[in-house]
Structures are given as C-alpha cells and as structure tokens.
Amino acid sequence: MTLRIGQGFDIHRLESGDGVTLGGLWIACPYRLVAHSDGDVVLHAVMDAMLGALALGDIGELFPDTDARYQGADSAQLTRIVRDRCRHLGYVVGNLDLTILCEQPKISPHRATMREVIAQVLDIPVDRISVKATTCEQLGSIGRGEGLAVQAIVLMLAHA
C-alpha cells in the first residue's frame, strides 16, 4: 500500500461579524473571517494538506483569490473538488489530524458535529478525523483574538 503524508496550514484575520464557518459548520459568534471565499480555515488547511501529500500545489493555485468565481465560495464544495481530484489519482484520506488555534469561538461544543461534517465532505468514516483546539495563551496575533489558524496533517492512502 502506498502512503503519502501532507501538511496544511491556514490563517485568516478576524473582524466584527455574526459568525464563522469552520470545518463546513456555521458557528454564530461576534466575529467573521476576512477572506476571498467563505474563509473556512479548517477546510483550507485540509485541502492544502491533501494537495501537498500528492505534490499538486496548493489551494491558491487551484482556486486563486484573483478569480471572481471563488468570491464567497463554499469551501466544502472546493474540498469536494480536491477530494475528487485525489480519488482520480488513486488516493483517499486515510486519516486527518487538525489543530485549531484560536481564543474564540470555543471549539469543544462544536467538535463532534465538525468531525461529522468533515467526514461527510471527504466521504470517509468519522473515526478517521481528529479535531483538536488550543488557545495561544494570549500571545501573538491569535492570542490577542486578531485571527484564527489551523494546522492539518493528512495521511493519503492509495486505493484500488
């Protein structure tokens, strides 16, 4: 069996708003993520990890922010495109490990649902997805609540 490992990272600035989309899940809070698409940093990191594992570039190449077609785009739909591209090359997600770095919103009340949504988007069992969260102990821009970041590591498996 052929294994490929990829790592992804994404960060977006926060500003006043009515909520954020994380892992395909809308979370009401007094912020919004500043981005060309829907700003889903979780799925952006996932896509970059998947693309990186297969040496396919990054989401900026595939879905450039200079292309008006991706203005406000649904990151879950973009992730399905990446998933299908990987499948076409003979790979599926074996497992996914995510770490969300933020002060707010609190992730723990949304973790189980977020895992389910990501599993549905990737079309894999939920037990292959780990979602963790940590604060930055009020250090740096994330610690000051100015932004939100995600690290993703994915194992891609060759399938028959």
Image: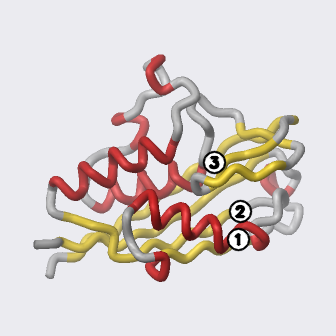
Q: Position of residue 101 (x, y in %)?
A: 71, 62
The quarter of the picture where residue 15 lies is top right
Q: Is residue 102 left or right of residue 24?
A: right
> Could you tell me if the residues under marks 1 and 2 are in contact, i.e. CB atoms within 8 Å?
yes
Residue that carries the numbered disc 1 in the rendered image: 133
Q: Position of residue 12 (x, y in %)?
A: 67, 43
Give the Cα separation between the discs numbered 3 and 2: 9 Å
Q: Position of residue 148 (x, y in %)?
A: 72, 52
Badge 1 density bin: few <14, some 14–19, many ≥20, Cα 10 Å: some
Which residue occupies 84% across, 57% down?
Answer: 104
Q: Is residue 102 above or below residue 127?
A: above
Kind of element beneath mark 1: strand
Give the Cα separation between the discs numbered 1 and 2: 6 Å
Residue that carries the numbered disc 2 in the rendered image: 101
Which residue occupies 60% across, 49% down?
Answer: 41
Which residue occupies 32% across, 54% down?
Answer: 83
Give the Cα separation between the discs numbered 1 and 3: 14 Å
Location of the C terminus by quadrant is bottom left
Residue that carries the numbered disc 3 in the rendered image: 11
Of mark 1 and mark 3, the one earlier in the sequence is 3
Q: Is residue 128 left or right of residue 9?
A: left
Q: Which amino acid, mark 2?
A: Leu
Location of the N terminus by quadrant is bottom left
